[in-house]
Image (tube, grey):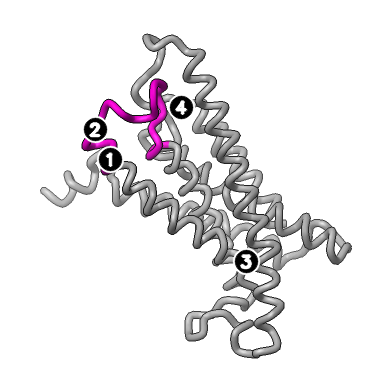
Amino acid sequence: MACFLVPAGEAIVTTVVQKIMEGKEKKAPGEKAGEEGLSWSRRLSWLNKLLWGGTILLVLEHVWHGEVVPWPPFLTAMENPANVAPMLHEMATIGVAMAVTVTIIWLMMVLIAESKAKATPEAEVKPISGGE
Amino acid sequence: MWLLMTTLAAVITTAIWYAKAPEDKYKLGSLSLMLWGATLMWLVDHVMAYLAEGGDFLEINLDATLLGIAVIVFALLAWEIMLLVSDPKGVLRKVLRR
């Protein structure tokens, strides 16, 4: 119904946080991510791509199934007051579960990348790498 | 079916990104993250629906297959827009200066 709104909300917040972090890192380039290589703006860019990519493609799926329409109130569940409570329930269960799952997977990605970065001698680290 | 097709697209994109890494001129890393994001969200949706309602885990029919194709086309379109906006080869700049 509208489960994608929860990860979309998280994506908006994390995008704003990423922009703030980028600004701070530009002002103080030395204080990136503590001692090791990955900056916070780069870590958050991975989460943003996961969240925005998922949200955009889920919106397409909802349009396909007629749950999202291009005219107000945009969500067909909102047209009938009886459908509002199930929609909110779906957002609170499936939507929250989606956002939490993506965030946990991202945390795991960051932890693995950090441990790999620490294990790699600095001379071997190339400035260009994927996912950004 | 669209879950399966999106997962396949994510796996293929990640393999191509890894083969080309650390070079990521064409933003394949971004495309693979977008596809993995959608895959994870649909996986959660499918698992929760299966636990709550039972029935088939995957919808396998023409409509679901067409949706899978539409999802991949839409993801590729979003990726191409990102590429054209960032223009890593400078192609648009060269064409527009002619």
Picture coordinates of residue A39, whole percent (x, y): 38, 32
Dot 4 and dot 2 within a common chain:
no
Image quarter (top left, top right, bottom left or bottom right) of the C terminus of chain A? top left
Foreground label between 3 and 2: 2
Dot 4 and dot 1 within a common chain:
no
The residues bearing labels 1 and 2 have C-alpha atoms spaced at a distance of: 6 Å
Q: Secondary structure at mark 2?
A: loop
- The kind of residue on which mark 1 rests is Lys
**Which residue, given by chain and number where applicable, does mark 4 sit on?**
B20
Q: Residue at x 57, y 49 (%)?
A: B37
Return the chain for callout 1.
Answer: A
Picture coordinates of residue A43, whole percent (x, y): 45, 37
Task: Kindly identify which numbered label has been placed on residue A3.
Answer: 3
Looking at the image, do the residues carrying marks 4 and 1 touch, with CB atoms under 8 Å apart? Answer: no
The residues bearing labels 3 and 2 have C-alpha atoms spaced at a distance of: 38 Å
**Which residue, given by chain and number where applicable, does mark 2 sit on?**
A28
Q: Residue at x 69, y 84 (%)?
A: A83
Chief secondary structure of the magenta portion: loop
Return the chain for callout 2.
Answer: A
Q: Secondary structure at mark 4?
A: helix
- The kind of residue on which mark 2 rests is Ala
Mark closer to the chain start, 3 or 2: 3
Picture coordinates of residue A100, whole percent (x, y): 63, 51
**Which residue, given by chain and number where applicable, does mark 1 sit on?**
A24
